[in-house]
Amino acid sequence: MEDVGKEMRGTIVSSFDAGFRARLGELFAWRRDVRRFRPDPVAEDVLRACLALATLSPSVGNSQPWRFVRVADPDRRAAVVASFERCNAEAAANYADVERRHAYERLKLAGLREAPIHLAVFCDTATEAGHGLGRATMPEMLRYSVVSAVQTFWLAARANGLGVGWVSILEPEAVCTCLDLPPTWELVAYLCVGYPQEEHLDPELIRHGWQDRSEVAMRLFER
């Protein structure tokens, strides 16, 4: 992290050319939610380089509230898997439409058993860094800052050939309890990280008919 900062200090950022912008667009397009991982280990220096880039993310008041927890203990991982399985079964049962429920049940929604690395990402809601700037009326900005760090890590991982899967079908309280963390740390993301088994031009949820991507015009409004 310090090395990244040292490299950037005192330099003038030149304008990025069309070739760079095209490659950046490819990176965004290939930022996928990965659920199928190879068992190959991830080199420590690659993981740390991705985390260092994540810490360059914007944060309200420069509070840097993100806290990354690598979950390596088998028993703790098993507790997370158990939470996922409970929540996943409940989510499936909530679909009244039988066809939609069966479509849900056919989806692979996590790579918790296969991924070599588990990263739980928390927001330290009690951090004094930033001195409260920018969050008096919108305290949720702390969590939004953590989300920006997750996205930066995701892109950095993809640039290094890694895949990341964000598992949200979990009980936050159960995860916090099994990891034995301060009560002021709130779970924002649970990430599976590793090398993907396969690469596809289309995202998995589109490929399996769950939800197509909408046009930009459908999400842009004028007032």
Image: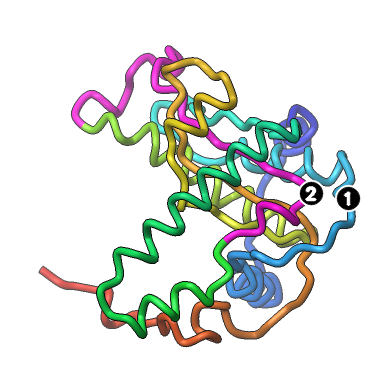
Main SS of the magenta part reads loop
Using the rendered view, name the quadrant where residue 48 is placed: top right
Q: Is residue 174 left or right of residue 112?
A: left
Report the residue at 66% width, 58% height from top.
Answer: 111
Per the image, the residue denoted by label 1 is 41
Q: Residues within 10 Å of mark 2 (few under 14, many from 20)?
A: some
Report the residue at 63% width, 61% height from top.
Answer: 15
Three-letter amino acid code at disc 1?
Answer: Pro
Q: Residues within 10 Å of mark 1 (few under 14, many from 20)?
A: few
Report the residue at 29% width, 82% height from top.
Answer: 217
Label 1, secondary structure: give it. loop
Label 2, secondary structure: give it. loop
Three-letter amino acid code at disc 2?
Answer: Pro
In the image, is residue 56 above or below residue 197? Answer: above
Residue 122 rendering spot, x and y as whole percentages = 51, 32
Q: Is residue 80 left or right of residue 101?
A: right
Residue 18 rendering spot, x and y as whole percentages = 65, 76
Residue 116: mark in rendering: 2
Q: CA distance from mark 1 to mark 2?
A: 6 Å
**On-image quarter of the N terminus:** top right
Q: Nearer the viewer, residue 41 or 136?
A: 41
Q: Is residue 24 left or right of residue 6?
A: left
| Count of all numbered marks drawn on residues in the image | 2
Tags 1 and 2 touching, CB below 8 Å: yes
Tell whether position 120 is magenta: yes
Residue range highlighted in magenta: 110-137
Q: Is residue 221 left or right of residue 135?
A: left
